[in-house]
Image (tube, rainbow, N blue to C red):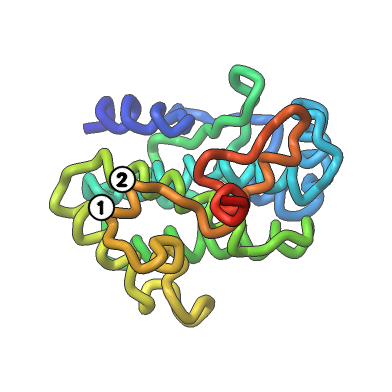
Amino acid sequence: MLNLNIEALQRFQVHLVDHAVGWMTVEECLDEYFHELVKSIENSTGVTNPAVATSVFMRRYGFFIAALLNLKAHNKMWEGPLNKIYLIHSDQTISFQIEANLIRDAQEEDLDRIIKRYGHTVVEAFAKKARISKLVLWENIWGYVLWMYSQTDTEQAKIDLHTLLQDHVWQPEIPTSMFRRFTSGLTFGEAANNYQRVTCCLYKELPNTAACPYCPINKRSE
């Protein structure tokens, strides 16, 4: 099972290792190294706006959340703290290293842990520091979660997806399911087959970059 986990998680730019190392941890990103993270992204992309740089990072972090949910869909859970999630530079972008010995069998409460420990905590901190909408950051995550579940055909995945579209797993921090908001009243299958964002991820602010095909700005200009 561990070999399957390693192969699957690499699709999400998450690398399982015995001893994780990196240039900073996610916990450090939320506090003393936030400006270093932003500066690194600005240097690699040419953007000069902290909100845009933060959105770029959260698109990468969406991979990490999708990786955790993929593990859960296979009845496994990585339970390390935020200071055990290491950022590494890989192919001129950011990937993640985590330690394999922190994977265990999944428990009923793990969806709640993923949303609140790894999702809500990070989104709240970045939204405040970068002065960017939490909706944008959550939808950056949702895009990869949507893709992951469209590619994952297990019974547990179906159960987990149904739960994530309900309100209770998000409460009390968030009153209603963020993920359900982004389906815009469509079924999951409809949302996956005709992906459209509710918010703009700000990628269009990068030098020489146009709005994405699924950006709401394109829809408004029609």
Residue 199 figure quarter: bottom right
Q: Can residue 216 be spotted in the picture?
A: yes
Which residue is tagged 1? Answer: 189
Q: Left of 25 or right of it: where is 164?
A: left
Q: Disc 2, disc 1: CB below 8 Å?
A: yes
Other-residue count near label 2 (Cα within 10 Å), few / some / many at <14 / 14–19 / ≥20:
few
- In the displayed structure, 29 sits above or below 13; it is below
Where residue 134 appears, x then y in whole percent?
63, 64
Residue 25 in view of the camera: no
Query: Would residue 187 appear left or right of 136 to someone viewing this image?
Result: left
Tell me what residue is drawn at x 69 percent, y 37 percent.
24
Residue 218 image label: none
Say left or right for 161 vs 29: left
Residue 187 position in % (x across, y down): 27, 61
Task: Name the element at disc 2.
Answer: helix
> Which picture quadrant has residue 74?
top left
